[in-house]
Amino acid sequence: MTAGNGAAFSAAYLEQLQGALEFIRGGNRFLVVSHVQPDGDAISSTIVVGWLLEQLGKQAVLMNEGKVPVRLQFMDRSASIINYSTMQPTEKFDRIIAIDCADFRRIGLVSSLFTEDAQLLNIDHHPTNDAFGAANLIRVDAAATVEILYDLIEYGAVPLDKEVATAIYTGLLTDTGGFRYSNTTPRVMHIASRMLEQGAPAHFIANLLLEMMTKAQLLILQRGLSRLLFSEDNKIASLYVTHADMAETGAVGDDLEGLVNYALNVEGVEVGILLKETENGEVKVSMRSAGKVDVSAIAQSFGGGGHVRAAGCRVVHGIPETATLVVNAVREALDK
């Protein structure tokens, strides 16, 4: 099989696509789950899989541990995604499709709904993915999981429509930073173009996800930037927000989207770091790299994961100690 922009798929990847289709055709009712605190690619991918299962005559229950971010609720089918944090169904599932999860732990508490003999299809693009499924569809050079799902739709010869085009375009847009990151390949642009042909409202999506800001988002940005710190050589920049900041400004997790990029985008900075204090006192760390440092390796050392240029983890220490630990790890990586 050859990709639409002329790129040929490997035999191994074609085998994975076939295996994914056989997994789907072999079941009737599926639980579709992505990672905790789902982002643009996770929600878009959840919607795409739900749509695909419907086209193939299957039943799907869509669920994540965490709510659909407000800005992503414009997509059809988003309202049908169950937030396990507020609603715990009792039904158990033996056919699971996990999407955009770098490892099994990222599924979170939803895994309690799996039967003991559950079979799982793992679809993902993270290089740290450990192929935890009974069937695995993994392409680490894909910009987003929706890109892999587009491959699956094309491989299965399922006709596209506006609903799925909108979801695929949204996943591509969010995981490429508005088609600005280095993962914006010719194939990404080819797929985006095809989604526009199918009616994806590009201007509306870009304005909603990239341009518009809430007041709370602006206020939390103001607090974060007031604490921007640089290493001695200015190659590492970090900032943080506390749980109190979030409460006082009325900000929610969605409002932190892109905040770490303000640290990375300073001239000369190689790694930008955002530390966010959670309600239970843990610190969620987001890291972005300009390219010299593999931040996924650093995140893994703290029990997290992600991509070479974008990764994250959770640390049980407070902000000061976490900042010291993470900055020192980044400094060591830069020294190598």
Image (spheres, rainbow, N blue to C red):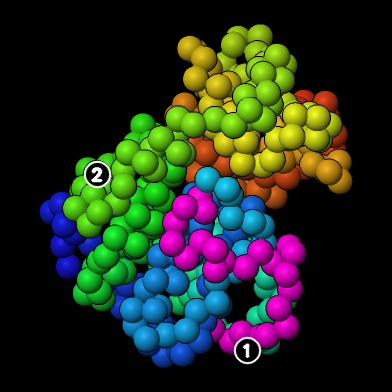
- Element type at mark 2: helix
Q: Residue at x 59, y 55 (%)?
A: 68
Q: Which mark is residue 242?
A: none
Q: Which residue of the protein is positioned furthest toward the left in this rendering?
A: 6
| 121 relative position to 278: left or right | left
Residue 147: % across, % down:
34, 56
Q: Earlier in the sequence, mark 2 or mark 1?
A: 1
Q: Residue at x 23, y 49 (%)?
A: 196
The residue stretch that appears in magenta: 72-96
Res. 322 visible in picture: no
- Element type at mark 1: strand
Q: On the image, which quarter does residue 45 sit in?
A: bottom left
Label 2 and label 1: CA atoms lie apart by 40 Å
Res. 291 visible in picture: yes
Q: Residue at x 41, y 51 (%)?
A: 171
Look at mark 2 in the image and give the residue it sits on. Answer: 189
Residue 214 sits above or below residue 27 on the image: above
Residues at circles 2 and 1 in contact by the CB criterion of under 8 Å: no
| 66 relative position to 155: left or right | right
91 part of magenta stretch = yes
Q: Residue at x 74, y 34 (%)?
A: 250
Q: Split into 4 quadrants, where in the image is the C terminus?
A: top right
Residue 57: % across, % down:
37, 86
134 part of magenta stretch = no
Look at mark 1 in the image and give the residue it sits on. Answer: 117
Q: How many marks?
A: 2
Tell me the kind of residue under disc 2.
Answer: Met
Residue 238: % across, % down:
66, 22
Task: Give the main secondary structure, helix, strand or loop, of the magenta stretch.
Answer: loop
Residue 281 sits above or below residue 68 on the image: above
